[in-house]
Image (tube, rainbow, N blue to C red):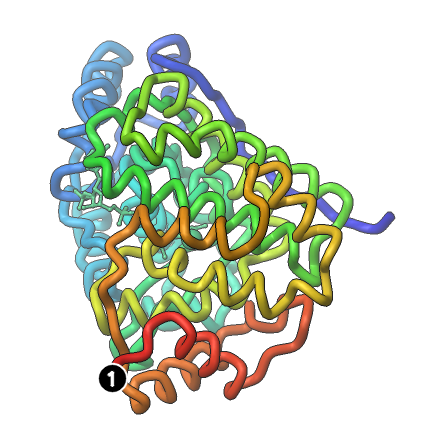
Amino acid sequence: MDFTLFMPTKVIFGKQCIFENGHLFKEFGKKALIITGKSSGKKSGALDDVIALLKKEEISYCVFDHVMNNPPLENISEGVLFAKKEKADFIIGIGGGSPIDAAKAIAALYTNELQPMDLFSHSLKNASLPIIAIPTTAGTGSEVTPYSVLSVRELKTKKSFSSPYSFPKIAFIDSTYTRSLPDEVTIDTAFDAFSHCMESYLSLKSNHQSELFALEGINAFSKCISAIKNRDFTDDIRDYLMYSSYMGGLAITMTGTNVIHAMGYSMTYFKNISHGHANTLFVGAFLRYNQSTVPEKTEKMLAILGFKDIMQFERFLLSNIKNEVTLSEEEIREYAQLACTQKNINNSPKKVDQSIIENMYSEVVKGV
Ligand code: NAP
Ligand code: ZN
């Protein structure tokens, strides 16, 4: 056995959990900068809850609610300017992966004299502003990862940076904040969480500990399959989805993601397809490609999920997302080339190269 686990985030999981822990906010200073999307903070109820709590604890605050989905670097610069003007002591990121990832980038650039693009090539000298993360989707697990995924126009793709300083100090994980999600987003994000667990479980970098997280997440996801089919998201199901997302976050913190994420980025960047939806398209192709290399793991996973084979599982996934995207030969070539610039392709159990990735795209989204 051989692994290293560094996960310094304090995790508080449960309904209404911020209210029982309001005193913890005070540890980080007198002024909070709340970073959220234009609607997620409000619709989820988390923004109102946090503001009520900050008032009770006599902590002043300001709100940056302009985070875009799949935030581009320009959006991050806007947030940094705002943060510097407001001089906050700590950041509260509320939302899906986009606002929480933006919070990590803004927190890093607040204390380090770097341009946003430098985040991908420089390690952080100074600790980021402390971050408290409150997820309102059950998908990315960003509340417990060191990753921040940003859209980079110059490179025509998404790129992630990570730093030990980017782990949130506290994650308040309350699945009731996902009640307001449209079903489509609940499902896309649930599939993203599953994909993190699956990509990590099969990863070349997987280890005894990461497999425990990944299988726990897959097991939680398996309890939600009929709810997904029936669009019947009870509070218990939302708890399982949130738990699966959290487990996926822990798993990819140890192993990173895999080929599926590398392939999904272009679908989001060029075709505006949501992150979870983009990944889901390639789950079947990835599993088929790797089946002969990791047969026991594939079988064990399918058994937990309750599907007889990859095809049946893929049908379940694809029938629950809008699968209407097509790509031209030229697009497939370009996207495969871009996927090959992502280092997570090296985590595939069976080695991939550009032509294999082109085939995987073709299997799923080739046009006439
Ligand atoms: P998202 O982009 O954060 O949000 C998707 C949509 O859902 C947005 O329109 C958002 O509204 C809305 N929304 C969020 N919570 C809501 C709620 N409770 N009620 C109603 N609407 C709500 O989606 P995401 O899938 O969670 O995050 C995707 C991003 O995370 C991608 O950039 C992806 O690459 C990244 N990611 C990061 C990690 C990591 O470890 N850091 C891992 C995987 C993926 P607003 O526009 O108002 O926010
Ligand atoms: Zn993801």
> Residue drawn 24% across and 68% down?
325
Q: Is residue 164 above or below residue 267?
A: above
Q: Is residue 266 above or below residue 45?
A: below
Left or right of 103: which side holds 204?
right
For mark 1, what is the residue? 368
Q: Nearer the viewer, residue 135 or 187?
A: 187
> Residue drawn 61% across and 33% down?
216
Q: Position of residue 210 (x, y in %)?
A: 68, 45
Q: Position of residue 110 (x, y in %)?
A: 33, 53
Q: Could one spot residue 131 in this view of the protein?
A: yes
**Image quadrant assignment for residue 53:** top left
Q: Nearer the viewer, residue 357 or 265?
A: 357
> Residue drawn 19% across and 54% down?
68
Q: Could one spot residue 89 in this view of the protein?
A: no
Q: Position of residue 242 (x, y in %)?
A: 42, 30
Left or right of 9: which side holds 276?
left
**Image quadrant assignment for residue 227:** top left
Q: Nearer the viewer, residue 176 or 260?
A: 260
Q: Position of residue 259 (x, y in %)?
A: 52, 68
Left or right of 185: which side holds 263?
right
Amino acid type, label 1: Val
Circle 1: is it few (<14), some (14-19), or many (20+) Cα within 10 Å? few
Q: Nearer the viewer, residue 121 or 323?
A: 323
**Image quadrant assignment for residue 257:** bottom right
> Which quadrant does the C terminus fall into?
bottom left
